[in-house]
Amino acid sequence: MSDLRAALVGTGFIGPVHLEALRRLGIGVTGVLGSTPDKSAAAATAYGLPRGYADLDQLLADPAVDVVHLTTPNRWHYPQALAVLAAGKHVLCEKPLALTGQESAELVARAAAAGVGAGVCYHNRYYPLCLHARHLVRSGALGEVRAVVGGVEQDWLLRRSDYNWRVLADQGGDLRAVADIGTHWLDLVLSITGLDVSAVLADLLTVYPTRLRPRGEVETFRRDGASATEPVGITTDDCGSVLLRFTSGARGNLWVSQVTAGRKYRVGFEIIGSEQTLAWQSEAPNELWIGNREQGNRLLLRDASLFTPEVARFTDYPAGHNEGHPDSFKMLFRDFYTALAAGQTGAAAPYPTFADGHREIQFCDAVLESWRGEGWVLLPGR
């Protein structure tokens, strides 16, 4: 679908997801960069790629690379994105875009100056029924949006012995559950509704002030049954609620948790309008509940024949053939690379941009301030 070629930075949980989606779209991948030259070489062999880069400088110096996909740990996103922009290449970065609003603001400015495509991997907005929900809201079918509730839940950090670099503030940032998965929900509901957050009130909880760290790092979601551990102090959030006020006057409530037993990764929302309500959740991504008062409620199953042409181009399978998590990445990348081919970058871009990533970091900064100060906090410019 595009003559542009990509390179992958990062070999952890999400890196292969990017690679598979790129291959499904027929986008060439020049190689991969791991945390060491040996890991780069091993990943290139395992993934069937032509090259394992020794370092980021070597990758950026490769004239065959047009687009860089950043799938590294959070603390590396800001410096690596800066380097990619300085090299004049397009970049698609995993969230969060940076660890602070100051960093993300700089990235937005640098991306605009570079004139390249700069996207953030908020893939949840590309589920077909989420795109259809956007159409319903924007067409006025719901009437006035009065409230948005929902959240994201997982259980992979349920036990004190569950550990990953993400729990450490100096590795992933001072916020964890909100920044790591809560921002996915925020981007999703804002992309659907067009609402803008004006203020937040956060009540978060660190369930385990001390966790047991294996002697040797572990990958996300990986369980090796290691027995040798050491205690490590934790200051980041395991779960909590964030009340939202929107500039329109609507209200919201976000619940986020990485300690909910049985939930592996559930993103869900309920958008409450003056005429209808919409409800969706990622564990049943091909179903959209539409609530009514004067007529029966409906459960809409994903069916491209019922979508507008704009929505239908983001679903590839006929009704009854489910599309899920890997397909949402494919559709995001389809939008990104199609836009790049058409020269759509900056504010005109249809994909989640660095500006969207900056918006989520500003939200996280306000949530952190609210949690620490135990009060309402206005977002910048509100």
Image (cartoon, rainbow, N blue to C red):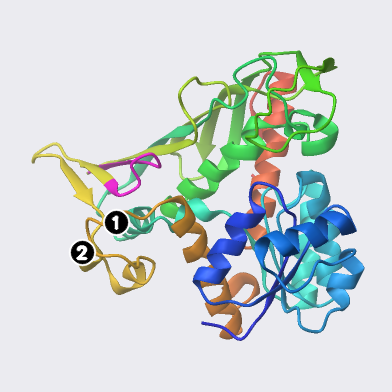
Residue located at (76% from left, 17% from top): 227
Q: Position of residue 169 (x, y in %)?
A: 81, 31
Q: Quadrant of residue 121?
A: bottom right
Q: Quadrant of residue 379?
A: top right
Q: Which residue is mark 1?
A: 136
| Residue at 48 percent of width and 55 percent of height | 326
The residue at the point 55 percent across, 70 percent down is 23
Q: Which numbered disc flags the more N-terminal residue, 2 or 1?
A: 1
Task: Tell which tag, 2 or 1, sits nearer the viewer.
Answer: 2
Q: Are marks 2 and 1 in contact (CB under 8 Å)?
A: no
Q: Is residue 69 left or right of residue 306?
A: right
Callout 2 amino acid: Leu
Magenta-colored span: 276-287
Q: How many marks?
A: 2
Q: State the residue position of label 2.
A: 306
Tell me residue 5's x, y (percent).
67, 79
Q: Secondary structure at mark 2?
A: helix
Mark seen at residue 125: none
Direction from residue 14 to residue 305 in the image, left or right: left
**Image-quadrant location for residue 178:** top right
Residue 380 visible somewhere in the drawing: no
